[in-house]
Amino acid sequence: MRDLLHLDLLKKGRALLAFSGGVDSSALFHLLLEHDIAFDIAHVNYHTRSSSDAEEQNALDLASRHRLQCHIHSCRLGGANFEHRAREERYRFFDYLMKKYSYDYLLTAHQLNDRLEWLMMQLCRGSGLPEMLGIRSRDLQGDITILRPLLEWDRASIETYLSKHGIPHFIDESNADERHTRNFFRHRFSTPMLKEFQEAIRRSFRYLEEDSDNLIEPMNFETLNGFSYAPNPRNIRSIVVGIDTFFKNSGYLLSQHDKEALKGGGEHIIGRHTVVSIEENYTFIAPYEPNIVMDKGFREECRKLRVGAKLRGYLYGSPEAMRIILRLKGGLEPPQSD
């Protein structure tokens, strides 16, 4: 039986487990108990299945039995693109809980099958290494540190663990429906491959994660009143990944066209509402404000500082952001109006 990843970190802090009551999160719940990890659980009830209320009650009962706190969020999401909106909803909930109760880590129960399926889907979408490794053992989303302790366990091992210990859990019937892309890859490819090549696949993911960490430099944005900026890493691929991550954390997904365009540097309008300005040393992100009439002094100062034309409209109405630009670019003081 495999151990949990990041046990050293888990033993030092308090964790919040995203708990659905399904196969993976039920196994992780009991494995955390076995290792004496301090944690509570968070459960989101979307009311989409006949068992939704029973799953919520199971989370409450399980937490009470083991003297843990169970945070419940109930919501009903109508309309299209349910999976994306459900993810946004639960991460808003998790973010609120992490800040209110000062948890150190958010735990999700992703496992090896999930990771392989994600890689395959990204491969078929023409993605690069960082995108294919979207499910990492340790990740940062905004201010939240996410740990995935089960990421080297395959689904068969998890089911064996549950059966051996007689641990009840819920089954999501939709997992059998191959009309869902992930299920198609699971049944046709990832499950058979892991039966034959599990150890090699596990080892490959370790190497890929190490390679990605070495190749892709982090990009740390600071934000003030809607204006964000960060020093540029040494290569454009790291810059594009950093900008992509920034937008994901803001709840917006860049298109493939956006990502390709960003590789050329310079200024870009994203979603008709945000300007991204990639300069030699810094990247600036701000609301896009066209058709702003600027005075001559301001325009001249921006020209001297080589501030992108699309960024100037926002800066004209934001003295604080302009002061940041001046500081980073070596200017002396904000320009005065005529």
Image (tube, rainbow, N blue to C red):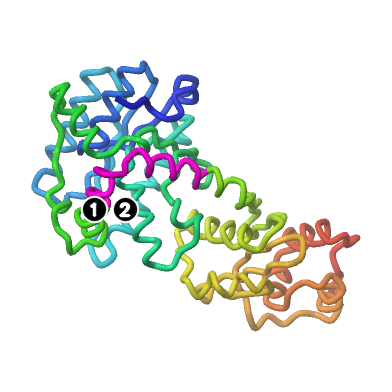
Q: Position of residue 63 (x, y in %)?
A: 25, 24
Q: Is residue 67 left or right of residue 202?
A: left
Image quarter of residue 263: bottom right
Image quarter of residue 100: top left
Quadrant that contains the C terminus:
bottom right
For the residue pair 285 and 135, the one nearer the viewer reads as 135
For the residue pair 150 and 227, the one nearer the viewer reads as 150
Are the residues flagged by discs 2 and 1 in contact, CB closer than 8 Å? yes
Which of the labelled discs sits on residue 117, or is there none? Answer: 2
Residue at numbered disc 1: 186
Q: Is residue 333 left or right of residue 165?
A: right
Q: Position of residue 265 (x, y in %)?
A: 67, 71
Q: Identify the magenta region.
A: 190-209
Indicate the amino acid at tag 2.
Answer: Glu
The structure residue drawn at horizontal position 44% and vertical position 39%, both measured from the top left corner, is 137
Q: How many neighbours does mark 1 have within 10 angstroms: few (below 14), some (14-19), or many (20 or more)?
A: many
The image shows a total of numbered marks equal to: 2
Residue 234, placed above or below residue 335: above
Quadrant that contains the N terminus:
top left
The structure residue drawn at horizontal position 31% and vertical position 44%, both measured from the top left corner, is 197
